Amino acid sequence: MKALCFYEHGDVNVLQYTDVPGPEPAPGQVLVRVRACALNHLDIWVRRGWPGLKLEMPHWCGADVAGEVAELGEGVAGWEVGQPVVVEPGISTCEDEFTRCGEHSLSPGYCILGEHMRGGQAEYVAVPAVSLVPIPQDGGGERGQAAAWDFSDAAAPLLVSLTAWRMLIHRAKLEAGESVLVVGAGGGVNSMAIQIAKLAGATVYALTGTQEKMEKARELGADVVLNYREEPQWSKAIYKMTGRRGVDVVVDNVGQATLTQSMRAVARGGRIVIVGNTSGPKVEIDTRFIFGKQISLIGSTMGTRQDFRDVIDMIWAGRLQPVVDRVMPLSEGRAAFQILERGEQFGKIVLTP
Ligand SMILES: NC(=O)c1ccc[n+]([C@@H]2O[C@H](COP(=O)([O-])OP(=O)(O)OC[C@H]3O[C@@H](n4cnc5c(N)ncnc54)[C@H](OP(=O)(O)O)[C@@H]3O)[C@@H](O)[C@H]2O)c1
């Protein structure tokens, strides 16, 4: 089969669209014919590699898979060949104190499809049968009976909506009437975070880097949008706009470039929720902000299996919209990675084999 693979870690030039042996479904697994697979920033980190990351080469990424059941492994029942499905991107590989509480993403045995195991940037992927969720045949919710789900729309929101849901609802415990600042609106996680914060009844402030992205952030529901390039001291602007109070919750997965300002923009007693560090991991923190303003810095990763079902149901029902920037053939995956690395997209880039 064809895959967008790499034989060594490195920059975008290590990516090759080439033939690799196809996977066989192990007992308990299902072989899925991939019809669409969304890119995530995670794929850039995995391709570059990090100390201690040991992958069987060639490796290919891809956490967000929508496709059709192609073959059932031994012991699997309840699925039809040809059935349209999405795949839960988090995969649990052991039972421990966390998984027994349903907190799979806290477990050291928690893996992400395409991170520690080969993913969906290929024609086929073998995944545990328990990871499959059927795509509604009727289009679901507001899409009405006539419109079937497009595979690209189905793949786009999977990992990012799960992440944004847990970080805002369970970790930051966002409440109706609160205010949220989303630092960088155009990302996969953040384009879902804007929508989830609105759905939860919050007032949403968003930062982004271009006029076009500002418009898109407003269309997603952001109440106030600032351009961080035109307004580099955005924390001061947020402070003024909120009556010198700050916002209740800041979503900051940019890290090095922004966390200091996020600590200024958050209100006394507020929460900053962190799932990533797109601009770099190391930040010098003035701890006086933490105790003086009684700020909580809250980490979050992925979500529970039930979170995935909950958020996917809201997507099927049309209460959260997939944000697809563009759909490209898998064979043009190298160009797609370049677009993501330059941060040109708003929402998700989806690859189709
Ligand atoms: N822990 C987890 O479970 C988890 C899950 C998903 C992602 N992540 C991490 O979260 C981060 C985002 O992931 P993603 O897939 O959403 O990435 P992405 O689609 O590439 O988005 C990158 C984001 O960074 C913003 N950004 C970059 N530089 C900025 C700056 N100087 N100021 C403000 N915003 C800036 C962009 O905003 P604009 O486009 O508006 O400029 C955009 O929102 C990554 O680091 C990823 O590894 C973690």
Image (cartoon, rainbow, N blue to C red):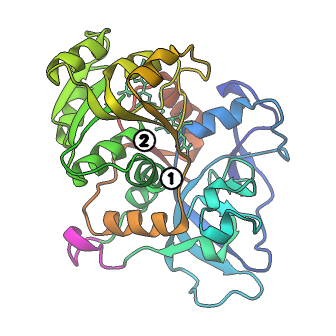
Residue at 53% from the left image edge and 57% from the top image edge:
303
Label 1 SS: helix
Q: Position of residue 23 (x, y in %)?
A: 77, 64
Q: Could you tell me if the residues under marks 1 and 2 are in contact, i.e. CB atoms within 8 Å?
A: yes
Q: Residues within 10 Å of mark 2 (few under 14, many from 20)?
A: many
Q: Who is closer to the viewer here, 117 or 328?
A: 117
Q: Which residues are magenta?
A: 137-147
Residue 137 on image: x %, y %: 36, 79
Label 1 packing within 10 angstroms: few (<14), some (14-19), many (20+):
many
Q: Is residue 42 visible?
A: yes
What x and y, as percent, mark residue 234? 28, 15
Q: Which residue is mark 1?
A: 159
Determine which residue is flagged by label 2: 188
Q: Is residue 309 above or below residue 90?
A: below
Note whether ligand 1 is within 8 Å of mark 1.
Answer: yes
Query: What's the residue type where badge 2 is placed?
Result: Gly
Across and down, in percent, residue 36 comes to 50, 57
